Amino acid sequence: MKRKIIIMGAAGRDFHNFNVFFRDNKDYEVVAFTATQIPGIDDKKYPSALAGKLYPEGINIYPESELKNLIKKHKVDLVVLAYSDLPFEVVMHKASLVNACGADFMLMGKNNTTLKTSKPLVTVCAVRTGCGKSQTTRAVVKALKAKGLKVVSIRHPMPYGDLVKQKVQRFAKLEDLKKYNCTIEEMEEYEPHIMMNSVIYAGVDYEAILKEAEKEADVIVWDGGNNDIPFYTSDKEIKIVVVDPHRPGDEISYYPGETNVFLADVIVINKIDSADFDDINEVRENVRMINPKAQIIEAASPLFVDHPEMIYGKKVLVVEDGPTLTHGEMTYGAGIVAAEKYGCVDLVDPRPWAAGEIKQTYEKYPEIGTLLPAMGYSSKQIKDLEKTINSAECDSVIIATPIDLRRLIKINKPACQVRYELQEIGVPTIADVLKNFGKKSSKK
């Protein structure tokens, strides 16, 4: 008799685990997905075109708040937790609820969820959202390209639109962002690769994505999402994990970030230029305790502001990356650091002017405080973000998102852009740990 399954997710790891383990597995029947973290994904269906022959009607996606009723309604045997960036205590609360409803609770490991690539592989993961994976990935890509290698990156899934159309996405030029109707969150991850003249893939079906990427790559770089573990493995791979001394202790208390620490070949302790000395030491000691064999790279994330004069002596509104503030739980980011560095006189609280879905975001994540999350999962959210910025009483706006929001929304006051890159301190560097990785070019 088939075991009835519910997969708890957030439109990423959940779909991947289904595709690689459950989709064609006649021992199981996935009766539902549940969804959280990402707005607007809990009223859709995982389509039949992706779900396979065992699911001709597709699979319904429900809000996670309905989990208890769904277990009872479908007489569910097993619930699989398949999303990331959760405190250990929260994971066990979810397990307790599932067990109390009579079902088993499952966390899937890498043996049943990774796909093997024939190419050399570098994976970049983290212990929390907002540690600095993106700039670390860019540093990896630059180091590999400097060796004459054809590098193709594959990003952790962000499929928030038409899942069938997003099965395999290839981004090589800015027009591709429009082609796939990308959200702000997606553009923040893909555009920096395009600006480096690099190719990055994403989508829903990561076996199909891998087959396409392997056709044009000497080496593949896995660009992780949240603090999830990689989707791929290889006979030749280097696993790089980024930790954040602004949140000491999270590297040993969040799921599945600690798993990444156990798996790491290289640990990057980022943001040491702005973190407390004792917090840096705590993080270093924690990762050494878990994984004493990993190489440790210390790094900074220096800021670059295009118009610092818009900050000095001004009342500023700071716009930060949305996911970093929401489920990433960061209370400050690059925008706050820039505001303090360049001498603003006041940080403006945007909450009195929060419009529509931005207001709802504050209600769901009250710990965000005086920062403005750049939520852009839908056109409605983007319009509400624009309205919030333009209504706020401030002298200028600091945009601390990976892309320049001035290209997407009309801002009625002076605005400056903050950029940040990885800067290794001392040795080893990213280039050092990749020195003997992959084939070297024959070009002189």
Image: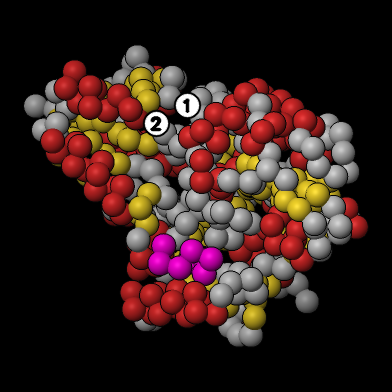
> Could you tell me which residue is drawn at 38 percent across and 43 percent down?
83
Numbered circles on residues, count: 2
Q: Dot 2 corresponds to which residue?
A: 35
Q: Dot 1 corresponds to which residue?
A: 41
Q: Residue 435, located in which quarter of the rendered image?
A: bottom right
- Above or below for 7 versus 121: above
- Locate the C terminus and report the quarter of the image it occupies: bottom right
Residue bounds of the magenta highlight:
241-250
The crowd level at tag 1 (other Cα within 10 Å; few <14, some 14-19, many 20+) is many
Answer with left or right where residue 385 lies relative to residue 345.
left
> Could you tell me which residue is drawn at 66 percent across and 33 percent down?
352
From the top left corner, tell me how far across and down residue 260 is, in percent: 40, 62
Mark with earlier residue (2, 1): 2
From the top left corner, tell me how far across and down residue 199 is, in percent: 67, 49
- Locate the N terminus and report the quarter of the image it occupies: top left
Answer with left or right where residue 36 lies relative to residue 93.
right
**Mark identifier at residue 153:** none
From the top left corner, tell me how far across and down residue 412 is, in percent: 87, 34
Q: What element carries label 2?
A: strand
| Residue contact between numbered discs 2 and 1, judged by CB atoms under 8 Å | yes
Along the line of sight, which residue is nearer the eye, 390 or 81? Answer: 390
Q: Is mark 1 on a helix, strand or loop?
A: loop
Along the line of sight, which residue is nearer the eye, 4 or 437? Answer: 4
Along the line of sight, which residue is nearer the eye, 136 or 69? Answer: 69
Visible residue check, residue 318: yes
**Amino acid, disc 1:** Ile
**Amino acid, disc 2:** Ala
Along the line of sight, which residue is nearer the eye, 329 or 405? Answer: 329
Q: Residue 350, located in which quarter of the rendered image?
A: top right
Rounded to the nearest angstrom, the CA distance separating label 2 from label 1 is: 7 Å
> Could you tell me which residue is drawn at 72 percent across and 68 percent down?
302
- Above or below for 51 versus 103: above
